Amino acid sequence: MTRHSPRTRAFLRNGVFAAAMVAALGAPAMAEPLTISNWDGYMAPDAIEKFNSQTGNEAELVLHATNEEIMGKLIASKGAGYDVVFVSSPFAEVLHNLGLAETLDHSKIPNLANLYKEATELPHDPGNAFSVPYAWGTTGLCYRSDLVKDPTSWDDLLKPSEDVAGKTTMLATDRWLLAAGQLDLGYSVNETDPDKMAKVRDLLIEAKKTLLAYDDTTFYAKLVSGEAELVQAWDGWCNYGIGENADIKYVIPKEGSDLWVDTMVILKASEHKDAAYAFVNYILDAANHRWAAENILYKVPNQAAMEGVDPSLLETYPNMAFKPADMLKYEQLRDVGDAQREYSRIVSEIKAAN
Amino acid sequence: MTTDRRPLLLMTPALLWLTALMVIPCALILVLAFFRRGIYGGIEYTWTLENLALVFDPLYFRIFLKSAGIAGLSAAIACVLGYAAAYAIAAMPRRRQPTLLFFAVLPFWSNYLVRTYAWIVLLNREGLIVNIARWLGYNGELPSMLYTEQTVIVGLVYNYLPFVILACYAPLSRMNPEVTEASRDLGASAWTTFRRITLPMTVPGIATGFVFVFVLSIGNFVTPALLGGGQFQMIGNLVYAQFLTANDWPFGAALSMVLILVMLGLLMAQAVVAERASNGKGQSDG
């Protein structure tokens, strides 16, 4: 999940570099500031500044481009050097399993009360013991309603009609690429049974023959240009296409979706626990959290924030109005442990197939 | 009286720089190839050869061979095109040559990604070429020009061609014109002269260009991802995926290690070719 605004994408490299420089230069300072790691553009540009001036803390932001990148650093340092990290739920789960995530003291995060009830019952962490959801959504089909018949099933993507063949894309990231096949066949998105996964592989190898490309980053641009007509997409990213062409629509296929959740985790190794709690609480403030919904066009699990969102936005981007109770019907991607190597292998087999 | 230490002194900063910032970090990564992947993507420090064995698993080995094929073909095409261009430049009047070489390396002034995206703008289904064809009155479906293996090869050749031009230009420009004149005077045709005299004397340049393009191509992951639409896994993509998505650093390290060995082998072969050529009967320096 590369969850940064695509508009700032081009600056990502520079941003990461600058952040690394800041981190390197700042290191010898006597008191280390509160360190928050997030994707580029995933919170308000002035969030840190406002937090510092409102609470008298000294927080600094560093950026990561992917979950895997920040996980590599956290595992290597046992969590030291970071106070709050933004990661997707399967990775929050890993941090918890490795004993790196702080067990949350809810009395220090009064704004947790702003969350939807459903956001406190997420299967990866019921009761928000170690993670606080920041944004959530589904993965489905994004398409040009003026060029293709409204799709209803994953079959419409994986076994496209003749006029759509060659004009579809799928996500390139292992888990979502496989999820399309798993959902189509009625399996769990965390299925690891070898026979079932062999069927998923065969289905996706067949689907590859009708595919324009695997694409994680520019699929909505391909829809806008007309290069593609039907793509597998995260709902939030489909909104970037909808913003440019109102004929673009988003639908969850009848077989279902996954429920992806990006979360905030406080590290057990944090030396500024109180400030870290204050930061999480600051983000959960209705106005602050609403920024993410209105600017990144992702749903946020914050009822108080969502209720304040400009209603015209929900009209333009209908998936912004998905009900939490409906989304919770879908299964979250979970950490599959050792089966990950098998997943990677299957994806290699699919991508190496002719 | 004493041996001259100055060369050593001059080399020391560069050597320290490379050792501290490249050799040691690379070694630290490569040694991971002998450890086990931890259940949560970390490293378990128990020795194993499992990762190296996995590189030779038919699935991954096929990807290796395929990458080598794509890199080899790209290098061969680049050598033919680049040699011809270098030959033409070397045949021009001396004062014009720097200008032509300048134009040959001009693409390097722009970012690799920008150049690659330019091909997407050009070739996509709603791109420049299709639109020009439509404007000219062509109405049929055009075959997909993007996201194929051929497009990947075109992209690699385009990006690395300047290296070959430079590598071939050096020996071509250094050739003593009297050598070829002598061949012609003794009755050899222009073709025979090229085949028997010019080509053998410039083989080191071709070998350097070939190895350069091959090495850069086989590890490339940007071009297959963008121009190949992610539908071809080259070995570079596989390594990238192990480190950045699969969180399987030991396997990524094992793949890198085999890749580095292949490259070292090629560089050694190239050194041998260069050595033979300079010890051979042809004296390339005029």
Image (cartoon, coloured by chain):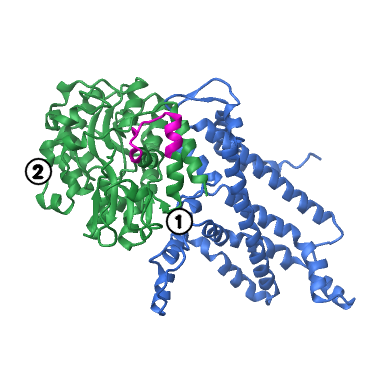
Chain colours: A green, B blue
Residue nearest the viewer, comparing A324 with A15: A324
Q: Residue at x 34, y 19 (%)?
A: A99
Mark 2 neighbour class, 10 Å CA radius: few under 14, some 14 to 19, many 20 or more: few
Mark 2 chain: A
Residue nearest the viewer, comparing A35 with B69: B69
Mark 1 chain: B
Residue nearest the viewer, comparing A8 with B61: B61
Q: Residue at x 24, y 48 (%)?
A: A251
Work out how far the residue at label 2 is from the one at label 1, CA to CA, in angstroms: 41 Å
Q: Is residue B205 left or right of residue A288?
A: right
Which residues are the magenta region? A183-200
**CB-based contact (under 8 Å), mark 2 and mark 1:** no
For label 2, the SS is loop
Residue furthest to the bottom in view is: B136
Q: Amino acid at mark 2?
A: Gly
- Residue A119 position, x and y percent, is 19, 31
- Residue A31 position, x and y percent, is 30, 28
For label 1, the SS is helix
Q: Is residue A275 left or right of residue A94?
A: left
Mark 1 neighbour class, 10 Å CA radius: few under 14, some 14 to 19, many 20 or more: few
Residue B245 seen: no
Of the 4 image quadrants, the one containing the N terminus of chain A is top left
Q: Which residue is mark 1?
A: B113
Q: Which residue is mark 2?
A: A308
Q: Residue at x 74, y 57 (%)?
A: B204
